[in-house]
Amino acid sequence: MTVYVRQYIKACEAFGSEGGPEYSTNIQEMQNKREKRNAQWSQPRRFYSLIFQNIRVSLYRGVAEMFHNRRGRWGCFLFNDRLDNTATDQQFAVAEVGQTEFQLSTLSEIDFVMQRTNVDALYRPDPANPGQSLEVVPVVRSNGVIASGWTFDPDRGLAYPPAPMAGGEVLTWSGQFSRWVRFDQDRLPFSIDNRTVEEFVVNGSIDLLQVPPPRDESSTSS
């Protein structure tokens, strides 16, 4: 069994689900009330608490199947963050001479201070089968002009130009992306709260935590 699978939970979370980025900061308060702050992480980690309300048992099985397959907190899978899943002309690098590999990222800039957030995985859910993934092919621009011939590692969000860069090119990209996550729980409590004519109706929630991308293809399966 592989640690990473390129699949999504089939059931759709309900309104009221929450999640977002977090950082880790050590803060030491001094006697004069000033603080010494030490940022532990250069990249954020995202957390999600997803609610499933009044879903039929057939949809609950989609949640349970992923939980069993991933053995609770052990294995990793894909998650589509509806608040942050698209890049539109996002600058990801200024190329260096001879560079042949780039990490796709999104960029936040305030008062000329830039923070890049790496992209995990170039996948999106298949509309015809939400539990499956479709590989995304981003559009890369070099100095504002669409650049052809680029290839991508969809499991790690890496981009490769067709030839070494001359240096100084401003590179941007557009496309969709997902994140690698795992369950942040080893129990899956759902309650039976109603029933239709055909089957029970259940409610529950799950917690997910973002994890780094796989290191090599041997740890990932479709």
Image (cartoon, rainbow, N blue to C red):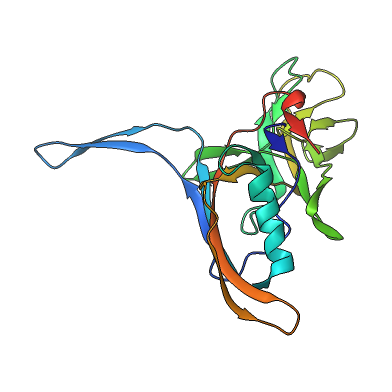
The answer to which quarter of the image holds residue 62 is: bottom right
Residue at 90% across / 30% down in the picture?
149
| Residue 150 in picture, x, y percent from top left | 85, 31
Placement of the C terminus among the 4 image quadrants? top right
The answer to which quarter of the image holds residue 135 is: top right
The answer to which quarter of the image holds residue 39 is: top left
| Residue placed furthest toward the top | 98
**Relative to the observer, which residue lies in front, 34 or 63?**
63
Picture layout, residue 114 above or below residue 190: above
Placement of the N terminus among the 4 image quadrants? top right
Picture layout, residue 21 above or below residue 199: above
| Residue 23 in picture, x, y percent from top left | 43, 41
| Residue placed furthest toward the bottom | 197
Residue 80 in view: no
Picture layout, residue 209 above or below residue 149: below
Residue 32 in view: yes
Residue at 75% across / 32% down in the picture?
220
| Residue 122 in picture, x, y percent from top left | 75, 41
Q: Is residue 67 left or right of residue 191?
A: right
Q: Is residue 153 left or right of residue 21?
A: right
| Residue 163 in picture, x, y percent from top left | 85, 19
**Relative to the observer, which residue lies in front, 166 or 22?**
22
| Residue placed furthest toward the left | 31
